[in-house]
């Protein structure tokens, strides 16, 4: 979708900022916001670019750096921490060969943390793109990532 089309889907009001940012980022093949994106949105909303940057830098779901095809987020909430989220993160980091904040050399996965994924009943949890996975253990993690590598996406159920 063309960026001007995205802008014109919404009235030029600050209350539409998060939707605009999400759409710009989701329409970028590398899942991030460029400086030009921020300037374009700021101009459309008639606010300083620094205001847009402040919002983007505050929310962890936005990125100012190119990311992989799939964004893997591990819940870092206290509930998930008590349920061994650190073990999940270590397994993911080892399996993918990257640290938190990095992207695999093939550009398929970016590993991030999230303060809460809102699925405490199935901790520890992670999401890949918009798909949530809970009750994780090392075997599940490896199977999930292998499915993404083999098919390019997951075709499974919402929760695992």
Image (tube, rainbow, N blue to C red):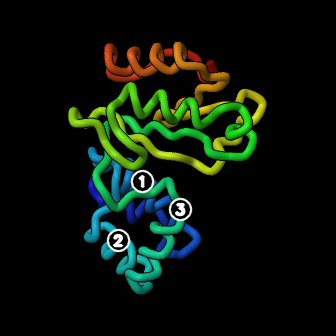
Residue 38 numbered tag: 2
Q: Position of residue 95 (x, y in %)?
A: 38, 25
Foreground disc of the pair 2, 3: 3
Crowd class of label 2 (few under 14; some 14 to 19; many from 20; radius 10 Å): many
| Mark carried by residue 59 | 3
Q: Earlier in the sequence, mark 1 or mark 3?
A: 1
Secondary structure found at label 1: helix
Task: Please identify, in this view, whether the residue under mark 2 or under mark 1 is nearer the observer.
Answer: 2
Residue 26 at x, y percent in the picture: 38, 48
Residue 116 position in % (x across, y down): 66, 46
- The tag earlier along the polypeptide, 2 or 1, is 1
**Residue 5 shows in this picture:** no
Any part of residue 35 in sight: yes
Which of the two discs, 2 and 3, labels the residue nearer the N terminus?
2
Are dots 2 and 1 in contact, CB under 8 Å?
Answer: no
Question: 39 left or right of 92?
Answer: left
Q: Residues within 10 Å of mark 3 (few under 14, many from 20)?
A: few
Real-space Cα separation, disc 1 to disc 3, in angstroms? 15 Å
Q: What element does badge 2 sit on?
A: helix
Q: What mark, if any, has residue 23 been given in the picture?
A: 1
At horizontal 21% and vertical 32% (from top left) the residue drawn is 106
Q: Residue at x 39, y 49 (%)?
A: 101
Identity of the residue drawn at 34% across and 35% down: 109
Rounded to the nearest angstrom, the CA distance separating label 2 from label 3 is 14 Å
């Amino acid at each position: 979708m063309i960026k001007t089309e995205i802008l014109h889907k919404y009235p030029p009001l600050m209350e539409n900022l998060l939707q605009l940012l999400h759409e710009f980022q989701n329409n970028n093949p590398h899942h991030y916001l460029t400086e030009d994106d921020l300037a374009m949105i700021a101009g459309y909303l008639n606010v300083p670019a620094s205001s847009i940057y402040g919002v983007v830098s505050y929310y962890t779901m936005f990125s100012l750096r190119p990311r992989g095809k799939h964004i893997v987020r591990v819940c870092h909430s206290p509930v998930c921490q008590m349920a061994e989220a650190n073990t999940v993160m270590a397994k993911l980091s080892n399996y993918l060969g990257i640290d938190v904040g990095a992207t695999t050399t093939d550009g398929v996965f970016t590993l991030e943390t999230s303060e809460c994924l809102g699925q405490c009943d199935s901790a520890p949890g992670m999401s890949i793109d918009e798909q949530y996975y809970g009750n994780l253990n090392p075997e599940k993690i490896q199977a999930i990532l292998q499915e993404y590598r083999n098919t390019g996406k997951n075709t499974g159920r919402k929760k695992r």
